[in-house]
Image (cartoon, rainbow, N blue to C red):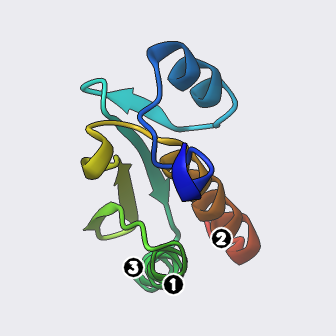
Amino acid sequence: MGNDGGRMTRLAQGEIDTLLAGKQGWTLEEGKWIVKKYRFPSFAASIDFVNQVAAVAEELNHHPMIAIDYRMVTLRLTSWSAGGLTGLDFACADRFDEAMEAGGRAG
């Protein structure tokens, strides 16, 4: 597993299915992405959330694809170096959801 505790080891489909079952709103796309859409009451609230996502991504050194569509933010996660999903993708998903809950701005 190396120094990362297995967080950058590509997950098997069964592991992905198990982890995804515990993630509300996250979906699997193309077998290698987990994706979630967050809706906000205003454009400013969506940008505040993206700034929180950026801080978490920098802390974990793992950066999502981010799409901002007015009041909708879409996050897409994969681990390019592993060729698919890893534990780090799911750890990031948890942290992004925590940021959302702490902000309490979803609409």
Crowdedness near tag 1: few (<14), some (14–19) or many (≥20) residues, C-alpha within 10 Å = few
Residue 14 in view: yes
Badge 3 element:
helix
Which residue does the numbered mark 1 point to in the structure image?
55
**Numbered mark located on residue 10 in the image:** none
Secondary structure beneath disc 1?
helix
Rendered image: mark on residue 43: 3
Cα separation, mark 2 vs mark 3, equals 17 Å
Q: Is residue 36 above or below residue 107?
A: above
Which quadrant is the C terminus positioned in?
Answer: bottom right
Residue drawn at (30%, 24%), measured in percent from left and top?
Answer: 31
Q: Nearer the viewer, residue 66 or 106?
A: 66
| C-beta proximity under 8 Å, tags 2 and 1 | no
Closer to the observer: label 1 or label 3? 1
Which residue, given by chain and number where applicable, does mark 2 sit on? 99
Q: Is residue 86 left or right of residue 25?
A: left
Report the mark closest to the observer, 2 or 1.
1
Q: Is residue 73 left or right of residue 67?
A: right
Query: Nearer the N terminus, badge 2 or badge 1?
Result: 1
Residue type indicated by callout 3: Phe
Residue 107 visible here: no
User: Identity of the amino acid at label 2?
Assistant: Ala
Q: Residue at x 41, y 66 (%)?
A: 62
Q: In x, y percent, where is residue 33?
A: 33, 38
